Amino acid sequence: MKNKIIYGFIFATFIFSTMGCKKYLNVNTDPNSALSAPESLLLPPAIVDIATVVAGGSFSVQNSSGIAEINSYWMQQLSLNQPLPIVENYKLTTGDADNLWNDVYINIMQNLKILNAEAETNQNHSYGVISKVLIAYTLGVTTDMWGDVPYSEAFNGNLRPTYDKQEDIYKAMQSLLDSAIAESQLAPGNSVPGNDDFLYQGNMSNWVKFAYSLKARYYIHLTKAPGYTAATQADLALGALDNAFAGTSDEATANIYSLAAGHESPWFLNTDLSQGGVVLSATFINFELANSDPRLPIIANKGSQDTYLGRVNSSSVVPDVTIFSTVADYYAGSASPIAILPYSELEFIKAEATFITSGAAAAQPIYQQAIKDNMAKLGVDISSPGVTAYLALRGTLTTANGLQRIMEEKSIADFLSIENFNDWRRTGYPDITIVANPAAGITTIPRRYPYSQQEISSNPQPQNTGVKITDRVWWDTQ
């Protein structure tokens, strides 16, 4: 895989992570005293790590790709011009998963647990709200990628915590979010977030909206889960959306990057051609061209032949990678923000949930507005002929095409988002096919991540033994 460059200001993350354990907790370390630190110092590195490594798909030191980048290869929005086997053709091993697993458990969730404990001890309830929302976010990413994971026993000093069932993890996430919403009604405390809150600068009303937004995300994930019904989950999602983000100004976006060396946006570094040849996939580019999407010039750069050209995933290495389209500055500029949870995701959740409960005609205006809002966010003049033509082509939902159209448009609006992999597994859309040269033994597109080799070795559990990346997690039913 391509090399990664260290981010200067993420250094604090490693200060906190190295104070902790190599596994869940070091048996020789007192987690209550050795890791104690003011909430204002614990929060910034957690947000930076979530934005940069999880949502931004980068590792700052390790020579590997993060979750959002892996998912973008599998969902064929990106392609990597390197010899096979690579993650693009589904080579993701237990060893590859070590960095992914350790980051969410040690660098993020463990530090967030410490933040929550400090907030609880000091009765600084605003920090308590934030820690619970961010734990629910990170735990959601973790269980969606791996399925059953350790949680209830993972942060109490137990070196071999049992795994919680994914259904129980989902219940725990909703409980965390409900607790955060309830805690927001308490006095904020003597220490309150401000500039250390890289998302909302201490605006707690937006953190409550973030909590409701996550609740909607997790409700809609379970439309096909065993024992759950699509109609019930859609109704729950719609209820949560009533109190969630109301516009793009509310969304959870980390605007923390700059032009300075070592402080660039992760997608700027991920897609730097000198870092390994990451370009746009032919699947994505061809879809955009076929539908004359007016967002294409904002999402993509033309290649050296002055055309939009995507690379066929897992095809032969091309000597001149510059012929391919690359991600443009809106997403991959050096100071581009990272959307941890964008408003567009909620608009399409609303469209999907309405489609499920009330049908295509009721969902259509919500769906069309979601497209226009995303275009406006990207700077497209929504009154232009190109937008009118696009909506005429893509804007009419029917019972037969409704779910497909909603998911296709959601994947464009949520370009490079982790959620695209979740949505594809739930719905089958966008309709993509397995790459031409999959890794040995792989006959279908992957549907989950392998457990970490370090985890398998140090904490062998029935759930992490013999797992294949083509297996399904609990909510991903046939």
Image (cartoon, rainbow, N blue to C red):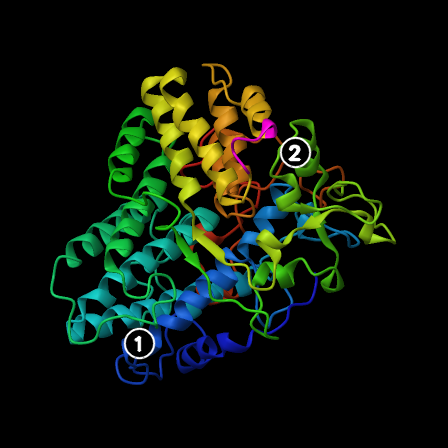
The residue positioned 43% from the left and 30% from the top of the image is 369
Q: Residues within 10 Å of mark 2 (few under 14, many from 20)?
A: some
**Residue 287 in the figure: left or right of residue 155:** right
**Residue 341 in the figure: left or right of residue 136:** right
Location of residue 138 (image quadrant): bottom left
Residue identifier under label 2: 288
Relative height, residue 400 to residue 458 (above, below): above
Residue extent of the magenta highlight: 381-386
Amino acid tagged 2: Glu
Residue 384 in the magenta stretch? The answer is yes
The residue positioned 71% from the left and 38% from the top of the image is 435
Residue 338 in the magenta stretch? The answer is no
Q: Which is more toward the observer, 253 or 276? A: 253
Amino acid tagged 1: Ser
Residue identifier under label 1: 40
Q: Which is more toward the observer, 60 or 200? A: 200
Residue 233 in the image, given as x and y percentages of width and height:
30, 31
From mark 2 to mark 1, how far is it between C-alphas? 44 Å
Residue 54 in the image, given as x and y percentages of width and height:
49, 58
Q: Nearer the viewer, mark 2 or mark 1?
A: 2
